[in-house]
Amino acid sequence: MKKHSLIKGTIILGMAGIFARFLGLFFRIPIQALIKDEGMGYYQMSYPLYMFFVAVASGVPIAMSKLIAEMNAKNDREGAGQVLRQTLIFMIILGTVFTTFMIMFARPIISLLKWDSKSYYAFLAIAAAPIFVSIMCTFRGFFQGLQNVRPTAISQIIEQVGRVVAGVLFAYLLFPKGIEYAAGGAALGTLVGSIMGSIYLVSTYFKVIREIPVRKKIKHKHILGDLGKAAIPISLGAAVGTIMSLIDSVLVPQQLLKAGFSHLQSAVMYGQLTGKAFTLMNVPLALSVALCASLVPIIAEAFYLGRRKELIKRVDMAVKLSNVISLPSSLGMFFMAYPIMHLVFMRDAAGYEILKYISICIPFVILTQTSTAILQSIGNYMKPVYNLALGCIVKVIVTYILVSFSFVNIYGAVIGTILGYITSCLLNMHVLKKSLNIKFNKIDAFVKPAIAAIIMIVAVVFSDVIVYNYTMSGGLSCIISILIGVIVYLIFIFLLRVFEYQEIKNKFLSKK
């Protein structure tokens, strides 16, 4: 099976991730128009437990990719097959148990959490999805371990297309029965998407099985133990983020009420933070997630084989790519917050200031994710989890104190998020330097991407003004100026030689 390099793998997964997130973003437009705020409330209530399972399961593909990369490095294809089979059995059992739990205790859970009883149908609709999420996670980890990210990328798009089309269709068909049924129909899209993604991955596996022999010759012991050793810390890290989001959903509105705002004002500000600012901030983070997914098997292979020079080069490339992704994203959202929000949310740009300031944390979020992936690739599993937990504590303390001041209000949560990720990022980078005894080339990794990003944003701002003066269309000027910015940024990335031609040729253009 063909391997993908770090740059190529990141681009493939990143483009698929961004496309999938845009589909998810536009999915909300027809659903919102159909079921309104009431139905969206029932729809959203079905998600916390499901997203917790997704967070827990997210450690499996990363841990699998590390184990399979190590076995692949010593040409142990049978071992890779055993990792797949044993993990698949375990994950299907886990998914089935979670699904059974959600279905059997749906009404008690809804009652305990004090949700509206009408959220029951959406809850049931989404309850079967964990089984198929388990299958998708397992096969994605397998292909990523072989350093082929294309199946993962395609499955993400197929899953999201299925979710969007089926969700809108079932919501429309069930709407005559009532809004609660329509919300359940929208939630059914998640199940359909996960089934379609699973079917694609399984069929792809059987197509390439001849290239990947899985004959049982050597019985590998402790596969699940090794997998758990890697997967549990990764899942804990993801779960911490999910749990903190849930805590935030309680903490921020309560502190806004203490600051003297009404329930309606608190809900509006919190919605602008989570429903708008965080949603838009997550788009560039898709590239970071893609980088981390590509990074783990590549770093793990070099580390396992003891190739220090190659390992350092790959780590240096990863940090450089993180900054190449994060710096223009941060500057773009900071200076173009109003036009972007005005375009995406159909002229509703309320809360654009929140997006402007939350964009400051993008470089720290991406460096935290990248350094976490590198550390876990070399077997340092728990340190990044501790660092993330410390960052979350900082975030909670700052948010709790600042949001209660009326003149700070929701921006206290923004400041808390920024300081939390700065804390995790600095701690991770310190551990990374200490673990690998590495010194980063600050000029290539930080200064050059920053210069290219500054030149880019100057071009974007000026072109936005010029195009708007000619067209008097905010949406058109925003799109054109962003496209101009992308072109200018790429030109200066090459002119400043952030990546050498030979490096790009070896890492991206060459076939393996």
Image (tube, rainbow, N blue to C red):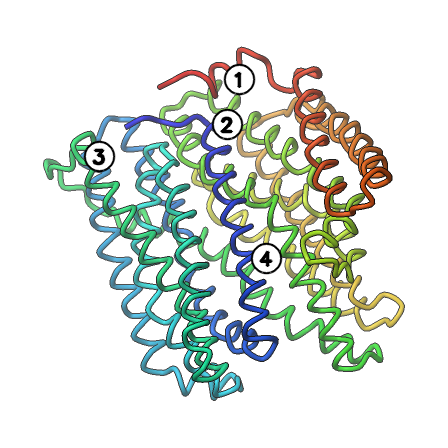
Tell me the CA gap for discs 2 and 4.
30 Å
Q: Amino acid at mark 2?
A: Ile
Disc 1 element: helix
Which of label 3 and label 2 is nearer to you?
3
Mark 3 and mark 1 lie on one chain; the one further toward the N terminus is: 3
Q: Looking at the picture, how far across and down is residue 6, in whole percent? A: 47, 28
Mark 3 and mark 4 lie on one chain; the one further toward the N terminus is: 3
Task: Report which residue position mark 1 lands on.
Answer: 504
Q: Amino acid at mark 4?
A: Ala
Tell me the CA gap for discs 3 and 4.
40 Å
The part of the image, by quadrant, that contains residue 403 is bottom right
Disc 2 element: helix
Q: Residue at x 37, y 77 (%)?
A: 124
Q: Residue at x 35, y 65 (%)?
A: 129
Task: Report which residue position mark 3 lands on.
Answer: 208
Mark 1 and mark 4 lie on one chain; the one further toward the N terminus is: 4
Kindly check if marks 2 and 1 are in contact, taking CB atoms under 8 A apart as contact: yes
Label disc, if present, on residue 7 of the rendered structure: 2
- Residue pushed farthest top? 502
- In the foreground, 88 or 12: 12
Q: Amino acid at mark 3?
A: Val
Tell me the CA gap for discs 3 and 1.
28 Å
Label 1, residues with CA under 10 Å away: few <14, some 14-19, many ≥20: few
